[in-house]
Image (tube, coloured by chain):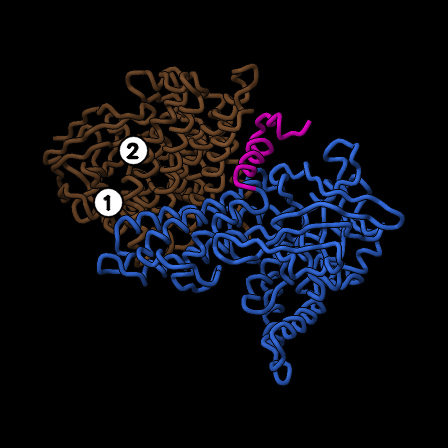
Amino acid sequence: MNFDLSEEQQLLQETVRQFAANECPPTRVRAIFDGEDGHDPSLWKGLVELGLGAVAVPDELGGAGLELLDAALVAEVLGAAAVPGPFLGHSLAGLAILWGGSDSQKKTWLPKLATGELLGTVALAEGDGRWQPGEWAVAGGSTLSGVKAAVPFGANADLVVVGTAGGGLAVVERGARGLAAQSQPGIDRTRRIAELRFENTPCESLPNGVTASARVRDAGLVLLAADAFGGAQQLLEMSVEYAKTRQQFGVTIGSFQGLKHQLANLAVEIEPARGLYWYAAHAFDHVPAESERTAALAKAHLTHVYMQAARDSVEAHGGIGFTWECDVQIYFKRAMFDRAFLGAPAIHRERAAALAGW
Amino acid sequence: MDLSYSAEYEAFRGEVKQFLAGHWPLRGDEAKLPGEKKAALFRERAIAAGFLARAIPKRYGGSEQSADVLKAQIIREERARAPGEMAGIGPSMLVPTLLEKGSEWQKEKFIAPTIRGDIVWCQGYSEPGSGSDLASLQTKAQLVGDEWVINGQKIWTSGAHRADYMFCLCRTEPDAQKHAGISYLLLSMKQPGIEVRPLRQMTGAADFNEVFFTDARTPKDWIVGKRGEGWLVSRTTLKHERNMIGDAQNALATFSGLVRLAQQTQKDGKPAIQNAAIRQRLVQLEGYVRAHQYSGYRQLTKASKGEDPGRVQLMNKLTSTNIGHEVAKLALEILGDDGLYEPGERMLGGPRDNAGWVGQFMWSLGSAVAGGTANIQRNVIGERGLGLPRDAAASGK
């Protein structure tokens, strides 16, 4: 009975934490957040050099040879530091090719994704809450036609894994004929999104895409849940710190029971929930029968908790919490991203109910 | 991460299973004994085999096993329908306190009969004027010759009407600062100076009482710890093999019951579980229940490695309380018209009739108040867990 991280996993988190503290302090997050493009290639290069370009891809294909749990642990730390960049979409693109691609497709693309030579992403959403493989309508084949929305760093990516009708997957490369990427005004400026239009765009179908796509979705749910946990914890720390510093009526405001209880409630929402994403990732790697449902449950719960934590943290910070200059808003918007991306909590709760046979 | 047990522990599980197969249920003439006698016989044998009373030295009637939270967990998992440790406030609170703070004769006299269930205890802590602010308690004990003479009143005393003895916080040092004026006394409930009056709860049942002391008496050496140390003595908790996941397992069992209720209850002409809003709330609640469960696994793992699980430990009770509230509200939603009827038997963790759920709707509030209200839990989490400044009034300084 061991429901805890190994020393290697703790070291992995510590390494990423150190990297974020040194290379991506709040000032740099802020600069990227306020910047035009939202993608900082040198920051991304640093993450890739740590081996985070393909965490759960086997080492013979250039990856770090770890599991989804390890990728999720990285996502937690990146979420806690609000590190801007394409980790989510890039990771999912690699996993899609790993699980759906032919041997030659894997050999062609995975090593380049792992080294960061190529920037990958996934194009899944088709609007109106249609994120799930069964809901995709873009017709696959040798060419693609249709529109995908909310593609993370879709305007920057070199390689896009596109979800196609029937739950398949196809790869489109940057500059392909008939591909037009248009940046969208995404709420989360640390993870920019774009709309991609395909018009008879040449693509390469992944032969096992239909079996891989649900798994890619589940991996995404786990990574979002992990990001949400990290972000929510950080918001708690920030709010507690503010409550210990800010003075009113001659005392620190954290001594007032009203605020103390709000923060205690927040802590009780967040801290015990860590295991939801741990277990979902563990199940993904080792308990296949439970993986789909636990991923849905973790995503629904933790992104909901994150959103509420963000609202509570704005309140806990008072007027300053409502300003653009306060970092709480950066987390608030990451929470909005985590909540909506791959489908809102209600969608995954309904899926979890159906998967339980209810 | 691996939720299975190692070969060493699986071997231990085998021993437990084998013991249970041979000893429960009882056979032959023993099977005809009354339930309590059967449980007592089983307990005696389980203690001899090292599966119960593991924290307690053999000379006080225990099995004296070295602490191993995983073995304790395996025993709980396997024991299922066989009797466990003797229930009640005596075995759960007094015995650990005596083990740590009691004198030799107190341990010898009280521990063995308490864990066998031969004597039953109640806890005299709360008073009408001293609830969350327990240390303001006013029940007085004065040493007169070789006896403490006790006057005052306790309240919310569970099981006082059945108890043989009470462990009790009394003010013995009226001139000392409030925490330092309290002593921890043991006393017999079977004496003329004690009057027990039942308190009827909103559920209609009467599990607890008011206890009035009018020159009640107890011997001079029936004090645990020294005079004025009672507050500290009362803070003693069970450290040996503390059950990290018991709360979560109760929550899981209750949640399963709620799912069954939703499957068996009709709403708008079909099972309530097919109602979209009910499904949403069930899964939302399951998120909290599973989080509680995995948090328990993590705390169990930390404890098994001798590591500190950290501030999350302070949150277990409030998490359980929150889950209890949500279960209650959702159950009432599912019950519909059955919410018109009086509650039936309290059947925690087992199958319930609908009236049982009406009882749970109220009982969930009892557990939110008992043993420290939810707001006191929030103070503890905020101050000890998050390091926020203490409330000036509550710090008692």
Front residue (pair A222, A15) = A222
Q: Quick one: SS at disc 2?
A: strand
Q: Which residues are magenta?
A: B373-397
Query: Which one of the lettered chains is coloured brown?
Result: A
- Residue A263 picture location, percent across and down: 49, 30
Residue A112 can be seen in this image: no
In the picture provided, is B216 more to the left or to the right than A357? right
Chain B drawing hue: blue
Which residue lies at the image location 42% right of the left edge and 42% below the top edge? A59
Q: Is residue B389 magenta?
A: yes
| Quadrant where the C terminus of chain B is found in the figure | top right
- Residue B226 picture location, percent across and down: 82, 43
Q: Residue furthest right?
A: B145
The residue type indicated by label 1 comes to Gln
Residue identifier under label 2: A120
Subunit ID for the residue under disc 1: A
Q: Is residue A18 magenta?
A: no
In the picture provided, is B143 more to the left or to the right than B122? right
Which residue lies at the image location 36% right of the left edge and 50% below the top edge? B330
Residue identifier under label 1: A132
Which residue lies at the image location 56% right of the left edge and 34% below the top edge? B379
Q: Vertically, is B209 above or below A272? A: below
In the picture provided, is B266 more to the left or to the right than A66? left
Which residue lies at the image location 46% right of the left edge and 34% below the top edge? A266
Residue A148 found in image quarter? top left
Q: Residues within 10 Å of mark 1 (few under 14, many from 20)?
A: some
Residue B173 found in image quarter? top right
